[in-house]
Amino acid sequence: MTLAETPNQENSLNPLLTLNYEPALESLGDDYYDEVAAEEFPQHILRWRNDALLSDLGLNPQAVTDEDFITAFGKFQGRKPLLALRYHGYQFGTYNPQLGDGRGFLYGQVRATNGELYDFGTKGSGRTPYSRGGDGMLTLKGGVREVLAAEALHQMGVRTSRCLSMIETGLSLWRGDEPSPTRSSVMVRMSSSHIRFGTFERFHYLQRPDLTQKLLDHVIEYYYRHLVNQTDKYALFYAELVKRVAELVAQWMAVGFCHGVLNTDNMSITGESFDYGPYAFIPTYDPYFTAAYFDYYKRYCYGYQPSICQWNLEMLQEPLKAIINIADMQVGLASFDDYYGAEYRRLMLKKLGFEQLNHPEVDELLELTIAFLKESQVGYHLFFFEMARTFSAKWRDDPACVLNNSEIAPATGTSVIFDNWCILYHKILNHFDLDEMGNIANNLSQHNPKTVLLRPVIESIWQPIVNADDWQYFRDLIHQIQTKQ
Ligand code: AMP
Ligand code: MG
């Protein structure tokens, strides 16, 4: 055996390389991407592998070695072409035609056991024609943060991409927003698609409605398959995208998540949440809470997320109007508020312990809950966790018992809103039979985990990594997230 043969033999046994890759996006042709090469890194240390996703791909995690991950997702051996995707986008409200995958590429597309096609997209894999002034790299902290966000959101029921792997790559990077030099990583993200609103916006800018048409047909064929044979499939596609996005934002709002950078190049055409940079979970209920330090005008603050996503959907009408009737799209977009409102209400009720509650007091309960969280500035997640922790059937007997053993109840008589909230919650509990209290307790604990990725929590696992290369706290945190502790 010659030395040259060794890698190929290894590759033919690597389950990550022998998956049934489908050239779905590649088959669209090179108007949509550029072929690129991956960076050769000085070091490869596997820091995260998502075995749950391997099972979704039909692989036995025990049959996939760490070395297999490194060969496939750190050295990027054995797969070609690697495609840097072309796109534009509105960034902080201004159109930017200088975008595209500047530090990533589409590694491949694979069908999971659920029959859906997924992208493996990289982040931090080197420079491309779209890197502009950037180094094409991802910091280790950036990799850690995206792994954590995706797992946490997934566990909280948000429709999100997830990270398949994250490998430390041994480079020193310089960043304005991290103590530098700082460590580097390369991540592989598994997402429903990396086609963005901005992928379409680019064809409007280039005045190529033919390429918009081709891409739209592709999107419907792969991600809105049930519409393929409908005569008005284009209008139905837009209407469904509006619904998916509205429901996604409602999910973010209910779990207290602020994405941070809702530019149209970070909006997936499948309505999935992805690309987690400077995100944050809100510590307290504050509509103006802003995650990105460079978002000077609070454009992407927590409370503006629904209206911003609506604006992004409106901007998408510009390229799509070459194919879809504008009046139909306006009708579609007009439903955003209803979809958003219904999903937000459903999710918040779950956090409050209820399913399908149709009593007239429901809206009042939601309003009072938000009013109390706003007035008191008690921890948003702590409030719901304390409900779950201290819930008792006794709350049905007397409003004074509601939350009385919790850490968050204000001193008696100091908050009219809180007193009214307790009276109303007590009243609603009395719409239920005593034997239904167990269901409410279950709902509360199911939807209000103790572990939430607040910034201090992320810092608490990051410091041992920086100071002692100790990854145990990171692993423990992921375990807590995955087991909803
Ligand atoms: P993001 O804000 O992460 O969605 O990135 C916006 C754009 O900047 C995308 O085109 C990225 O590919 C590009 N970009 C971000 N960071 C880097 C980097 N370090 N090197 C090259 N391009 C980058
Ligand atoms: Mg992005």
Image (tube, rainbow, N blue to C red):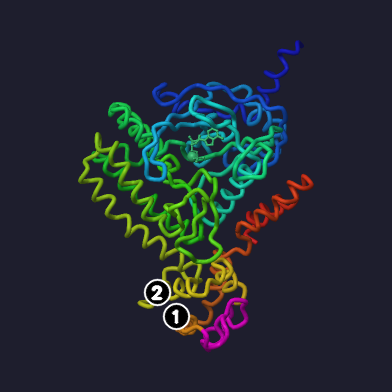
Residue 440 in picture, x, y percent from top left: 53, 73
- Whether label 2 lies within 8 Å of ligand 2 gets the answer no
**To which residue does mark 2 refer?**
362
The answer to which of 79 and 45 lies nearer the viewer is 45
Residue 62 in picture, x, y percent from top left: 71, 39
Q: Which mark is residue 472?
A: none
Above or below residue 6? Residue 454 is below
Quarter holding the N terminus is top right
- Classify residue 355 by image quadrant: bottom left
Residue 343 in picture, x, y percent from top left: 40, 60
Residue at 79%, 47% in the rendered image = 468
Which residue type carries mark 1?
Answer: Ile
**To which residue does mark 1 refer?**
428
Q: Main secondary structure of the magenta part?
A: loop
Magenta-tinted stretch: 391-414
Which residue type carries mark 2?
Answer: Val
Which of the two labelled residues, at mark 2 and mark 1, occupies the earlier sequence position?
2
